[in-house]
Image (cartoon, helix red, strand yellow):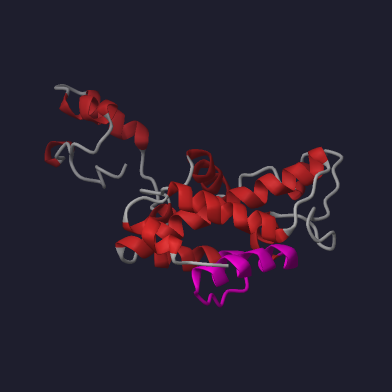
Amino acid sequence: MYHIKGQPIANIKVVTQASWMVQKILTIEGPSPQIYLQQLGSLAKVEWKAIMFRNLARPKAVFSMWLIIQERMLTADRLSKWSMNVDTACVFCKCHSENHPHLFYECTVIKELWNDIFRWMQIQVQTRTWSQLVCWFVEKAKKKYVEGHLLRMILAETLYSIWVEGNHRIFEKTHRDRQSIVREIIYICNIRAVGILKDVLQHKFI
């Protein structure tokens, strides 16, 4: 629990940012707060929380990113393990079995998409694997206000766009070129941006 962090219940200060439910539980007199904390158990901290908090991307994109980071999306390799009759080849390159690392970064087609995004952002990213990409975004997302907000949003919207495009190719038999996907990501990020972040994005180009 973010607001608890292993502290004794008596020492916990109920912050205004906590949800109404947490505030209610922690201000109740009696055994209820202790029971609540026992039910939570000891949860390991995750590094990728930095890319989740205060993310300006669309809620559905942020939620999808949360699933993707934990490799919970129903990719072909997962479905095949459940004895489902599916084509396990990557829907983009057709040359490699589909799994989370490949689908969202290591596929040659998807890497070109990411390279277009990085060129638009005017940055160089030297990562070869999916795990390296996630680590790079996590570290950068901790930085100064503008850069952190921008990177969190772009990561979520790009991952979501990859997932949606893959589904369209499988189920609707439609196909968009890479540039169309990238331009849509840029457009959405510009729409979602606020304040100084919008000014920064409007000076980017592709």
Q: Give x and y (percent) for residue 18.
A: 25, 36
Query: Residue sitting at 64 percent across and 44 percent down?
Result: 73
> Is residue 28 positioned above or below 90 on the image?
above
Reply yes or no: does residue 119 show up in magenta: yes
Q: What percent of the width, then of the height, locates residue 33?
A: 23, 28
Q: Position of residue 103 (x, y in %)?
A: 70, 57
Position of 101 with respect to 59 (left or right) is right
**On the rendered structure, is 63 left or right of 13?**
right
In this picture, residue 57 sits left or right of residue 114:
left
Residue drawn at (52%, 77%), measured in percent from left and top? 124
Residue 101 in the image: state x and y as whole percent. 65, 60
**Residue 47 shows up from this direction:** no
The quadrant of the image that shows the C terminus is: bottom right
Give me the residue at 53% from left, 67% from top: 205
Residue range highlighted in magenta: 107-132
Query: Is residue 25 among what the camera can see?
Result: yes
Q: Quadrant of residue 128?
A: bottom right
Q: Residue at x 52, y 49 (%)?
A: 188
**Quadrant position of residue 16:** top left
Q: Nearer the viewer, residue 175 or 50?
A: 175
- Which SS does the magenta portion mostly show? helix
> Which quadrant holds the N terminus?
top left
In this rendered view, identify the residue nearer to me: 180 or 63.
Answer: 180
202 falls in the magenta region:
no
